[in-house]
Amino acid sequence: MHHFTYRDGALHAEGVNLVDLAAHVGTPFYCYSTATLERHYRVFADAFGGRDTLICYSIKANSNLSVIKTLAQQGAGMDVVSEGELRRALAAGVPPSRIVFSGVGKTRDEMAHALQAGIYGFNVESEAEARALSAVAQEQGRTARIAFRINPDVDARTHAKISTGKAEDKFGVPWNDAAALYALAADLPGLEPCGVHMHIGSQITDLEPFERAFKLLSDLVGDLRTAGHTIDFVNLGGGLGVPYRGTDDIPPHPDDYARVVERAAGALDCRLLFEPGRMIAGNAGILVFRVLYLKHGDQKRFTIVDAGMNDLIRPTLYDAHHDIWAVDEARGQEPALVQDIVGPVCETGDFLARDRALPPFREGDLGAVMTAGAYGAVQASSYNSRLLVPEVIVRGDEYAIARARPSYEDMLAAEHIAPWLTPRKAMGRA
Ligand SMILES: Cc1ncc(COP(=O)(O)O)c(C=O)c1O
Ligand SMILES: N[C@@H](CCCC[NH3+])C(=O)O
């Protein structure tokens, strides 16, 4: 459920009319709903009511500081994958004790920074990383709480590019190596192997892979405890899918997901950590565009809009489907036309929708790409020297520009022409 609805003939984000917002901010822009962010966090948290949980919102899905702070105020911890994300979480006032650090390629500097900050723990993805973290912790005289990320070789039945728990994926350590790695970590100075982590992929719409993976993880915890390790938390990662096609592809409800967790890991007597990203932010954001031109090719009708693959790369990268709505309600009720919605970027793959029956947009119309709150703005670029897309957050009738569109001056000021390219003044030599 989200808070983007039609009122008085125009699409609103909560109480804010998107026609007015577009006039103030200019298009394209992302728009986030506070109420949806809060609701999704609550639905997820409430599914585990009564349990000792730490829900670490996965910042990579949407790392806007206002989004992070909105969730932190609900009690969310954060899952970060870089020093940049760690700094964002800290800047938004998230207590370090609620932050976990994931990722296959943490640098020693990043580890040092996170250790100094006093984070809850590290998800460690290789023996080499465990050794590096041990060395960094020793230098600082600190102890790093760690969970090895276990690769269970389970097919998450999602898009190949966002599946992370198969043996051929770069993530985690092989299931069969786990016992030896925990034994090693227990011997290495500066490490406290006290958790187990797993994250099998993203946009998962089927509970069965979760069930299989969590069961394996639970068995592993039993084995590790028998081997003498104190395991006080299990981190079940994120991955729960969201509906991208209106009401056609409703993924499992967090309550059903919670039942799977309970069945597989409920008896473990330890803290449960989660790292949901998309499930919290996906439906809380839209990308608003304006139609520039209409063009009828030999075979197709193209609606050329001012948002492109640099602003939202998911359709290009994963052939992802996003619903597209007209901001003008009346336009949305006219008979649909099959068309491609394409951006201005000079790439054939620059499209937001292909061969889709959509409203008969006209020049100047506003449209909204739905379910764009996760992996949207964070994956935007300035390809074709287009200005990085701004982000707006709404709460009730209020809105705030949470990240402003840079100016062309900002864009040019970030670069320096190599000195040898600027002709030197004549030195007065004969
Ligand atoms: C380690 C880890 N945790 C959590 C997430 C968040 O996943 P999702 O947005 O699908 O919930 C990801 C991304 O897939 C991840 O790599
Ligand atoms: N970027 C992907 C999700 C990646 C998940 C990261 N572990 C998407 O847009 O669907």
Image (cartoon, rainbow, N blue to C red):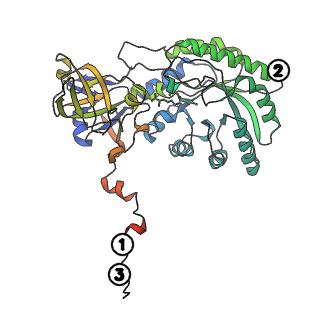
| Residue linked to disc 3 | 426
What amino acid type is highlighted by mark number 1? Pro
Q: Where is the C terminus found, in terms of image quarters?
A: bottom left
Q: CA distance from mark 2 to mark 3?
A: 80 Å
For image coordinates 74% across by 26% down, the residue present is: 178
Q: Is residue 359 above or below residue 263?
A: below
**Circle 3 residues within 10 Å: few <14, some 14–19, many ≥20:** few
> Where residue 423 is drawn, which disc sits there?
1
Q: Secondary structure at mark 2?
A: helix
Q: Nearer the viewer, mark 2 or mark 1?
A: 1
Among numbered discs 2 and 1, the one appearing first in the sequence = 2
Provide the secondary structure element on which disc 1 rests.
loop
Q: Nearer the viewer, mark 2 or mark 3?
A: 3
Q: CA distance from mark 3 to mark 1?
A: 9 Å
Q: Image quarter for residue 19?
A: top left
Mark seen at residue 133 = none
Q: Position of residue 55 (x, y in %)?
A: 57, 28
The tally of labels here is: 3
Separation (CA) of disc 2 from disc 1: 73 Å
Tell me which residue sits at (42%, 13%) in the image: 250
Front-lying residue, 246 or 36: 246
Q: Is mark 2 within 8 Å of ligand 1?
A: no
| Mark 1, other Cα within 10 Å: few <14 / some 14–19 / many ≥20 | few
Q: Which percent across, then down, holds residue 261?
A: 61, 15
Q: Position of residue 43 (x, y in %)?
A: 49, 20
Q: Residue at x 57, y 15 (%)?
A: 258
Labels 2 and 3: the sequence-earlier one:
2
| Residue situated in front as seen by the camera: 217 or 5 | 217
Task: Name the residue carrying label 2.
Answer: 226
The amino acid type, in three-letter code, at marker 3 is Ala
Identify whether 245 is placed above or below 104.
Answer: above
